[in-house]
Amino acid sequence: MNGWSKAVGPKLTDGMTTPTPHHPELLVREVELLRPLQWLALAWRDMERCPTAGVMHGLVLALIGGGCFWFARHAFWWLAAMLSVSMTIAPLLASGLYDISRRLERGEDASAVGAFRIWFSGDRRLRQFGLLLALTSVGWLVCSAALIHWMLPASVYSPADFVRLVVLQPNFGLFELWLIMGALLAAPMFASTVITLPLLLDHPTLSLQQAILTSWRVVALNPMAMALWAGLLCLFTALGIGSAFLGLLAVVPMLGHASWHAYRDLVGHHADAL
């Protein structure tokens, strides 16, 4: 139970997977509303213990995001596509940070070299999950373009056009619908990804389908805490991007390590309940 008392700690639910020779029996835990703040605190501890790897992960994403913005700054849809790709690969790149937190938790040595080795592990499940994220990004772009072109008499070519014609348009409707559509598309993706990658990393024999279903069970059991966690992810990501991508040097490792601690709090094994 990760050392948490029954009064304030995670609670195990009755719902569990059927154990097979290929994967462990997983249990989903219930956590209190403000638990995500504890994950962030634990993330800062991991960053202090192994700072180099975290900064390097943040630097990679900052360079990718900044480069995409520079080359596509005058073409809105190319910019949206490139930033979507950057956000898509961010969870996959953070897999090295999950490994660092796991090693620190076990009292093992953690290094940047070992973290980056995860990227080249050849795990087919990670490639499949990356493809799923990419298809989701494409779907969001197609839906966004269809909505804007359907409701606007003028075309959006540049980021300035998007701000002027969509964000700042005087009539209620388009921008609000765009936000609602984005939220409706983001919600199932968040539910599918919130603990999936750390779970796959921690259990090499677990199937991708089982990991995603477990992630959905986590969100279903903890809707308020997961809503807060999603809000924190969006807030810190926006701050990282809005600071000319420089903030990603701290935001990426913080959210990466915190995601590992979220997984450890939210998913357990049958042995934990004994």
Image (tube, rainbow, N blue to C red):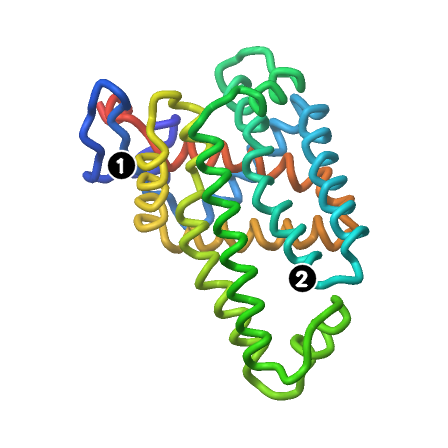
Residue located 22% across and 35% down the image: 16
Pick the quarter of the image with the N terminus.
Answer: top left
Q: Residues within 10 Å of mark 1 (few under 14, many from 20)?
A: many
Quick check: 92 left or right of 129?
Answer: right
- The secondary element bearing badge 1 is classed as strand
* Relative height, residue 40 to residue 147 (above, below): above
Q: Residue furthest bottom?
A: 171
Chain-order first, disc 1 or disc 2 = 1
The quadrant holding residue 151 is: bottom right
Quick check: 210 left or right of 169?
Answer: left
The quadrant holding residue 120 is: top right
The one of 201 and 253 positioned closer to us in this rendering: 201
The x, y position of residue 72, in whole percent, is 76, 55
- Name which residue type carries label 2: Trp
* Relative height, residue 54 to residue 188 (above, below): above
Residue located 38% across and 23% down the image: 203
Q: How many marks?
A: 2
- The secondary element bearing badge 2 is classed as helix
Q: Residues within 10 Å of mark 2 (few under 14, many from 20)?
A: some
Q: Which residue is mark 1?
A: 12
